Image (tube, grey):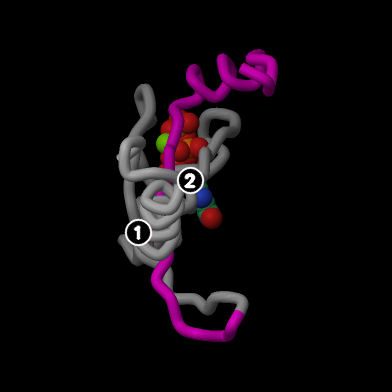
Amino acid sequence: MVKQGIKAIQHYCKSLEQEQKPLNEIKILLVGDGGAGKTSLLKQLNNQEFNAQESKTHGINIQSLTLQTQNTQQEPIEVTGHLLNTGSNISKALAMTPPYL
Ligand SMILES: Nc1nc2c(ncn2[C@@H]2O[C@H](COP(=O)(O)OP(=O)(O)OP(=O)(O)O)[C@@H](O)[C@H]2O)c(=O)[nH]1
Ligand SMILES: [Mg+2]
């Protein structure tokens, strides 16, 4: 392409721009004390049944859900949410981790 000159490179860059599409994905990290209700909140968002005897979460669980919303032009779009649900030990470790890491 370099041999073809600057015009060919500009044309290639322009074609890349046209192929760009928004990902429409968000990541949400749920942290909090053990028993705070993180898993229950997640189940509620996922239309799953509430369990008064919910077992403790170990490590990190990742669940995805699709949300219907609108973009800035008021057009309907789908956004995929990736919810990272942490157990209390991971929550504590994250709370002590500097935010720039
Ligand atoms: N009444 C009521 N009880 C709740 C609510 N959310 C959670 N609970 C109670 O609190 C318990 C613990 O909730 P979890 O969702 O497991 O809490 P968690 O933050 O995920 O806990 P870990 O996984 O141990 O970190 C549940 O089993 C319920 O008994 C709520 O909105 N209302
Ligand atoms: Mg939990």
The answer to whether residue 44 of the structure is visible from this angle is: no
The residue pinned by badge 2 equals: 27
| Vertical relation: 8 (above or below) 79 | above
Whichever of callouts 1 and 2 sits on the residue coming sooner in the sequence is 2
**Toward which corner of the image does residue 95 lie, by quadrant?**
top right
Work out whether residue 93 or residue 81 is closer to the camera in this orientation and state it. 81
x 48%, y 51%: residue: 26
The residue segment tinted magenta is 73-101
The answer to whether residue 93 of the structure is visible from this angle is: yes
**Toward which corner of the image does residue 61 lie, by quadrant?**
top left
The residue pinned by badge 1 equals: 65
| Vertical relation: 54 (above or below) 91 | below
Residue 33 lies in the magenta-colored region: no
Q: Amino acid at mark 1?
A: Leu
Work out whether residue 39 or residue 4 is closer to the camera in this orientation and state it. 4
| Quadrant in which the N terminus appears | top left
Instruction: State how far apart marks 1 and 2 are (Cα).
Output: 11 Å
Work out whether residue 68 or residue 48 is closer to the camera in this orientation and state it. 68
